[in-house]
Image (cartoon, helix red, strand yellow):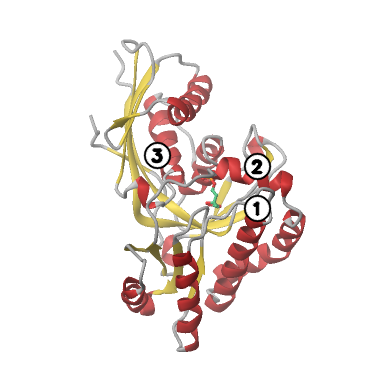
Amino acid sequence: MENLKSTARANSNLALIKYWGKKDPKLFIPMNPNISFTLEGIYTTTTVEFSDSLEEDEVTIDGKEMEGGKKEKAVKHLNLIRKIAGKDLKAKVVSENNFPIAAGLASSASGFAALTVAATSALGLNLDEKQLSIISRQGSGSSSRSITGGFIEWKIGNTSEESYVEQIAPKDHWDLRDVIAIVAREEKKVSSRAGMAETVKNCPLYQARLEAINEYFPKMKKAILEKNFKTLGELTEHEALSMHACMMTTKPMILYWTPETIRVIKKIVEWREEGIQAYFTMDAGPNVHVITLSEQAEEVEKRLKEIEGVEKVYHCRVGDGARILEEHLF
Ligand code: PMV
């Protein structure tokens, strides 16, 4: 019998221009183009084995067998990949994150990228990064950006085939750092999927956000290519605030911040006055990602650890895209 088993590892990623809203909710085509960099060191490892001895898909994440909604999302993604490969075998999926999911860091980006690469490889599909990103996107939008390393752009496109990611610059282009202040460990109450759908429908500021992105998207790309840290930082902060302003002015409101989030933001603004080059951004949660340059990253890390309410700090460089590993998890 063929050996239909593969293992892949994918890093998480951090958006500098965020994806928050779908133009096509079925195909996961985003409302706006977005930009990220892949994060070294925060990753998911996933082994997938397809076999005719299984009666249904089995999905285990961090030692826990999945049921309900979480399992359904993985099964739906496996169905898409089975359809592309023209195979109808059930799969055993074992996935491990090297960071606690409950830390509030996005696991869907690294998780779906690793699942996509492992499952397509196990079924013998030989796909390039563009094709992998198109598939991964349909499991979780942001995961499409974790397929590739370095600095990434996800194009909107009008069709599924046109909505894929491309590298803007490789990881060695610029030694940026993301120093992450973890301030909460609870699972969030409003998922990204539900939150962005509500925002698109019920936020009066949303259109203004999209118009602003048209203007600062090319500027962000240029800032990356020219390594203009001040412009990148200012655009990143403004962009995060625009997304959170939209969340907060959605009816009913979506508020991901806690008092600690604001405490960290204020500190960063103060540090800048002292000459520390650091800028903040937040995803759909209260944790604060602090973008800084390699020369000041240690200092930023030290200072973040001293802030009351900061439980843990992760320090990430720009990372590689998803890759196949020889060693399996089972
Ligand atoms: O792909 P999802 O459903 O996990 O949504 C990601 C949403 C944000 O993290 C807030 C923004 C982004 O572009 O990563």
Q: Nearer the viewer, residue 16 or 169?
A: 16
Task: Kindly tell me whether mark 3's CB lies below 8 Å from ligand 1.
Answer: no
User: For the residue marked with disc 3, what is the amino acid?
Assistant: Ala
Which quadrant does the N terminus fall into? top left
Does 238 appear above or below 207? Answer: below
Write down the quadrant of residue 8 in the picture.
top left
- Classify 10 Å Cα crowding around label 1: few (below 14), some (14-19), many (20 and above): many
Q: Secondary structure at mark 1?
A: loop
What whole-number distance in Å separates the C-alpha atoms at marks 2 and 1? 17 Å
Q: Which residue is mark 3?
A: 114
- Residue 247 bears which disc, if any? none
Q: Nearer the viewer, residue 54 or 244?
A: 244
Task: Please give left or right for residue 130 compared with residue 89 in the image.
Answer: right
Q: Secondary structure at mark 2?
A: helix
Write down the quadrant of residue 64 in the picture.
top left
Q: Which residue is mark 2?
A: 197
Q: Which residue is mark 1?
A: 33
